[in-house]
Amino acid sequence: MASNWFEAPAPVARRVRAYFAPVQRALQQPEIFDPVANGRFDLDAPPTPWIDLGWIESFLRKSKSKSQPLLTGIPASVFGQVRETLEADVSFEFQRWTKLTMALATGSQHMNLLAGTAGGTASPVGTQAATAVAIQAGSTATALILSSTDVTQFSAGSLVAVDADYTGQLGFVGTPIAGAYVRQALSDVDYVRRITFNVGLVAEVNGGTLMLAQPLPGGDPGPEAKLQALTGFVDREGGSFYQEWSALFVIVGSQDERIFLHYPRLQPNVGAEETATPLGERRSGGQQRIALKASFAALPITDALDGERVLCYRSFLPAPHAAI
């Protein structure tokens, strides 16, 4: 009888796909990926709250953990080993420029350039922002209801930031994704909307409702949320705040096998950097693709299964009918 299984070769893959999810900073709670429940998810529709950041290039991960021999006896001989340090790095290039890829490719606060009022004082992070408008009850992550007066300020193609006023909060700020850590009270009422990850693109205006092209990363806006237009993004070299996110890297083989590299906690360990790749013939003045170069240090979590400290989980789902 003919067998219905085959000897699978080493996986052959073209690219790596990246997904990130926010860590709840105040609770020190990372996002956990379950390969049993979600291992066969549609790559274009990851499970909540994972955010698809597309295919990445030049993916490299390196373990820097060190072991130390445990000596015993006279003369001393190696009895076993103990793990002296637990370290790992991950680096790659994003092929997309978005709010989140820019934030992940730098180490500090990543800000929204809030649309300003005429005559505002010049600032590297934008002039005086226009007054925020209230969001009406019944709004969702994809449909923001405004008053009949406020809705006229926006049109299809508008970029918007949605979050609460800053009212002197200390610690991690940003709802629900932390975008900064405030050590002393500030005077900027718009500060939370400057650093929020709750941003969206208006696809159309339907009556008094702004319909967004994608759901807000933070979900439905809270009762205190307000909205401001933004024109772009800005980050800074320096500062004391570090981004921290959970990461999932997926490698899909030619036989539909899948390799998952799950890092529950990653923090950027270098400043902002870009790489330029020439397109076509290499010559002066030729076009170049500008990619965001990202590098991270992995931070440990304590696995609830057995109390071990872990930096990364590598999972493998074999190809259908492949021998194991």
Image (cartoon, grey):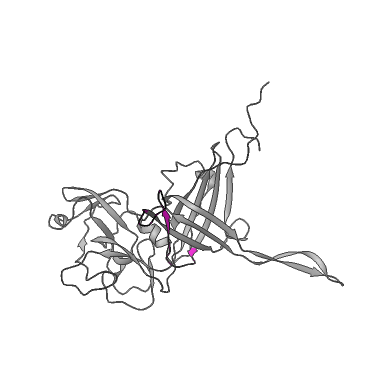
From the viewer's perspective, tell me whether residue 100 is left or right of residue 125. Answer: right
Q: Residue furthest left?
A: 149
What segment carries the magenta color? Answer: 267-287
Where on the picture, by quarter, is residue 225?
bottom left
* Magenta residue check for 50: no
Where on the picture, by quarter, is residue 135?
bottom left
Q: Residue furthest top?
A: 1
Residue under the image location 30 percent in, 66 percent down = 194
* Magenta residue check for 285: yes
Give the number of callouts. Answer: 0
Q: Is residue 245 visible?
A: yes
- The percent position of residue 31, horizontal first and vertical second, equals 48, 56
**Above/below status of 41 relative to 242:** above
- The percent position of residue 279, horizontal first and vertical second, equals 40, 50
Q: Residue furthest bottom?
A: 184
Q: Is residue 303 visible?
A: no
Residue under the image location 64 percent in, 31 percent down = 6
Residue under the image location 62 percent in, 34 percent down = 322
- The percent position of residue 266, horizontal first and vertical second, equals 50, 61
Dominant SS type (magenta): loop
Please name whichever residue, 3 or 184, is drawn nearer the observer in this view of the structure. 3
- The percent position of residue 118, horizontal first and vertical second, equals 15, 69
Q: Quadrant of the C terminus?
A: top right
**Above/below status of 46 relative to 151:** above
From the viewer's perspective, tell me whether residue 63 is left or right of residue 120. Answer: right
